[in-house]
Structures are given as C-alpha cells and as structure tokens.
Image: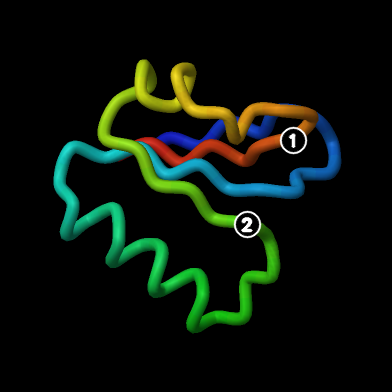
Amino acid sequence: MNQKVIGTNPTSVAIFAQSPILRYGIKDMLESLGHDHKINCFSEFQDFIKSRVTDRQIFRKIVF
C-alpha cells in the first residue's frame, strides 16, 4: 500500500484500486472506524481527474 499526503490537512480520502471489492471494502472499513472525511473510490487515476471532487479539496491518497 502506498500513501501520499497532498497538503497538510486532508479533508477527503481518495481510494484507488482496480478491484471494486477492495475499493469499497476499504471505504467501509474507514467508515466503521469513524473516519469523518469524505471518501471517494476510483478504479484509475484518470477517473479521479475526470471527476469533479477535486474542487478545492485536499486529499489523502490511498493506492493499492
């Protein structure tokens, strides 16, 4: 697992994984642990770029 923190105070989490089971499993795990930031799941980085979630948000990126 690689993590890269972009910015100093992340407000959202972006999860990148090819497997939908892995993506949403990690999302469910973070939510069950009380993670209070917005969580977004993507299969590819290009999907992240195309999405509109990048507007003024600082992300903690989790890549599998």
Q: Amino acid at mark 2?
A: Lys
Q: Is residue 4 left or right of residue 30?
A: right
Q: Position of residue 62 (x, y in %)?
A: 46, 41
Quick check: marks 2 and 1 in contact, CB under 8 Å?
yes
Q: Is residue 34 left or right of residue 2?
A: right
Q: Position of residue 32 (x, y in %)?
A: 49, 83
Q: How many marks?
A: 2
Q: Position of residue 27 (x, y in %)?
A: 41, 63
Location of the C terminus (image quadrant): top left
Q: Which residue is mark 2?
A: 38
Residue occupying the far right of the picture: 8
The mark nearer the N terminus, 2 or 1, is 2
> Which residue shows up at 45% across the image and 26% down it?
48
Q: Is residue 19 above or below residue 59?
A: below
Q: Which residue is mark 1?
A: 57
> Which residue shows up at 39% across the image and 73% down it?
28
